[in-house]
Amino acid sequence: IQIHTTSKEYPVILGAEALTALAPFLKEHLSNVTKIMIITDSNVGDRYLNQVKHQLGEYEVVTHLVPNGEKAKTFDVFYDCLTAALQEKLDRKSLFIALGGGAIGDLCGFVAASFMRGVPFIQLPTTILAHDSAVGGKVAINHPLGKNMIGAFYQPEAVIYDIDFLQSLPAMERRSGFAEVMKHALINDLHFYQWLLTDIDNLQTITTEQLQECLSKGIKVKESVVSKDEKELGIRAFLNFGHTLGHAIEAEAGYGSITHGEAVVIGMVFALRLSKKLLHLQFEQQEFLEWLHKLGYSTKVPSGLYEEKLIDRMKQDKKTIGQVIQFVLLEEVGKPVLYKIDENVLLEELKQFMK
Ligand code: NAD
Ligand code: ZN
């Protein structure tokens, strides 16, 4: 799949054994690369680092291990990566490789964007979620005052997505990533959504072919959006479907207590309810809920969270302008719109949803 953005064009090479495309890609497109630094975490590194290094046999490769998951996206870890790169004498012709999920990709991409004002990097995604995060060039770390608050738009040279790496993905990480597949279907393509609904009924036993189809379709939706709006001046905001409430739930529940995608699913359920009520969306909500339950998702806001606090969080959302909260709603499946919503209406709807 070719990704077209204003700043760069690059391929996503997706499939079983896609990793074998890495060395040939380097030979063809980055022939003068001096040194390579792989950034990974131990969950992924313990399993796949040797395989990746094996592919890079003829290059000078160093590895920098960072904490697992969201703990990788801190300023300290970012700084340590830069220190390691300087100590290892990487230069402008060096390459960073992100081997891991979205956290590793976001961190490594930002390191690559910052090191010597920008050196190339390649994404080797290892989660389902990363079909979303590895494509489109948003890279970032977190600040204690807000997630993804320090970052850049910086596109990789390539995304090499070996589906075999997904086999070891735990159930909750599968659910987290698959939520973004659903999101891509709901905002863009009724047939894709209907196919998911009828064909996917178990994320543990999903076949490689099905997974490949889900990821490929999801990536194409993301491509179609970011190719028109790389820097989120307009329609890229549609990719936030389910995220307004989803992010608020994540932040209120505490990162780590619920995965990103599991929170986004609850956000999508709520956004669909609002869409039915406010925009008369035709949608079989009950069928959707039953499917989600079958796949192991919770569709309710976790207990112990308060409506008012969630609304305060939503006011910090990047789509909020002058304190007015905006939701991505659907007029139809595949037809998203940005909708400004009155705070009192939102509070009432949220109260009913959380009953
Ligand atoms: P992650 O990188 O934190 O991975 C989740 C967990 O799974 C980690 O503990 C990791 O070590 C483990 N893991 C990864 N691959 C594995 C494998 N193959 N087998 C076993 N364990 C594995 O998270 P993620 O869910 O992939 O991504 C979440 C991050 O992505 C968030 O920080 C979010 O902000 C970011 N994100 C970015 C964008 C973007 O456009 N840049 C979009 C969506 C999300
Ligand atoms: Zn997301």
Image: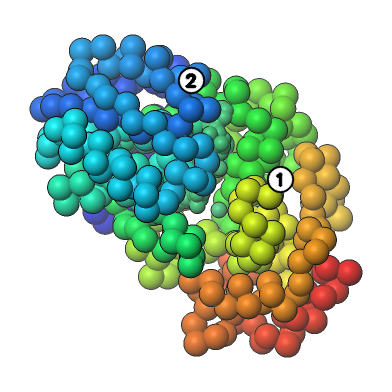
Which amino acid lies under the numbered mark 1 shown in the image of this protein?
Gln
Q: Secondary structure at mark 1?
A: helix
Which residue, given by chain and number where applicable, does mark 1 sit on? Answer: 194
Which quadrant would the C terminus be assigned to in this image? bottom right
Which residue, given by chain and number where applicable, does mark 2 sit on? Answer: 46
Vertical relation: 16 (above or below) 339: above
Where's residue 53, x and y in %?
33, 16
Say which quarter of the image contains residue 343: bottom right
Nearest to the observer: residue 298 or residue 146 = 146
Residue 277 shows in this picture: no
Residue 36 shows in this picture: yes
Residue at 78% from the left image edge and 39% from the top image edge: 295
Residue at 69% from the left image edge and 38% from the top image edge: 172
Q: How is the image coloured?
A: rainbow
Tell which tag, 1 or 2, sits nearer the viewer: 2
Which amino acid lies under the numbered mark 2 shown in the image of this protein?
Asp
